[in-house]
Image (cartoon, rainbow, N blue to C red):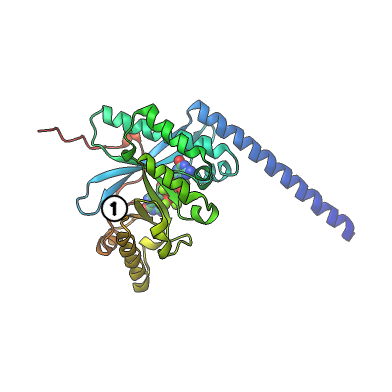
Amino acid sequence: RAKSAGRGRVEVFDEELRRHLRETAELEVAIRHGLAAGDFVMHYQPIVDVGSGDVVGYEALARWDRPGHGVLAPAEFIPLAEQSSLIRDVGRWGLVEACGQIARWDAEGRSPVTVAVNISGRHLASPAVVDDVEVALSMTGVDPRRLVLEITETTFVHHPEAPARLQALRDLGVGVSIDDFGTGYTSIGRMQDLPASTLKIDRSLVAPATERGRRLLELVVHAAHATGLAVVAEGVETAEQLEAVRATGCDLVQGFHLAHPLPVDRLDVPRAPVPA
Ligand code: C2E
Ligand code: MG
Ligand code: MG
Ligand code: MG
């Protein structure tokens, strides 16, 4: 009896594994197809100067308008793409899309904002990433200073080659922003080794529940400034949080309190000032 129950479990496990593998394979095919069919779109969320309230840039956030499934958030396709070379295809698509948007805004006489693109650790770890960024810039004729690459802090834990690769990217002239800072294990001492221009403080640190938490936020902001990094507070959801991050000296803010990510046709990108 015990034996047959055990066998039953193995069969269930086998079946689940098979189903999982089949679903994964199907989703991979669907992502490839969706990229080719133009079903992926970028939404853009403003990054705002705390002092002036001006929009200085946007973060590009990928969405997949999957036929029959609605609009899917990155959590539904990025982790899977990251398990294979597919992440490079998604990454290249994102770079070209974002640079193309910078060029379109320029052609429309919009104010010269920066656009930040998220690059996955696996893509950054491959030497091809430098080519991918170069190609996107040259295809669209965009000034590298207008592009910022967002790399999550945990990338440096998993990919020891990441800092060297980042330096090669910095040499192209693009900005580099360390994303989700405070969720990984980068010591403050290591911040000086990161070839970054900006530190994005994770939402979990931006809404401190205690006085101790607030002081920690302050410490991170000071440390970032001391090492020459600009600081973005991400995930600012309330007026109180905006006040708190302003008080700690953050330079830039991003979050639902200021604006949600939106498709291009619903954004109000400021016009460039007319030269006198
Ligand atoms: P992230 O880079 O840290 O992006 C910020 C996420 O927080 C976005 O979620 C954004 O919509 C959300 N967010 C913005 N303001 C607020 C707020 O005030 N409150 C809360 N609760 N959330 C806020 P989203 O768009 O679902 O993206 C999730 C993650 O997926 C991103 O985190 C990024 O790591 C990744 N991702 C997005 N687009 C791409 C892409 O094109 N390529 C790669 N490799 N990863 C991407
Ligand atoms: Mg990001
Ligand atoms: Mg983040
Ligand atoms: Mg995040």
For image coordinates 52% across by 37% down, the residue present is: 88
10 Å crowding of disc 1: few (<14), some (14-19), many (20+): many
Q: Looking at the picture, which amino acid does disc 1 mark?
A: Leu
Q: Is residue 136 left or right of residue 251?
A: right
Q: Can residue 64 be spotted in the picture?
A: no
Q: Nearer the viewer, residue 46 or 165?
A: 165
Question: How many numbered marks, from 0 up?
Answer: 1
Quadrant of the frame with the C terminus = top left
Q: Which residue is mark 1?
A: 252
Answer with the quarter of the image where residue 240 lies.
bottom left
For image coordinates 60% across by 37% down, the residue present is: 27
Q: Nearer the viewer, residue 176 or 55?
A: 176
Give the vertical position of 252 relative to 41 (above or below).
Answer: below
For image coordinates 33% across by 32% down, the residue present is: 142
Q: Nearer the viewer, residue 199 or 64?
A: 199
Answer with the quarter of the image where residue 248 lies.
bottom left
Q: Is residue 210 left or right of residue 70?
A: left
Counting from the top left corner in percent of width and height, residue 254 is at 33, 51
Indicate yes or no: mark 1 CB to ligand 2 under 8 Å.
no
Give the vertical position of 124 relative to 214 (above or below).
Answer: above
Q: Can residue 56 be spotted in the picture?
A: yes
Counting from the top left corner in percent of width and height, residue 32 is at 56, 31
Give the vertical position of 94 relative to 215 (above or below).
Answer: above
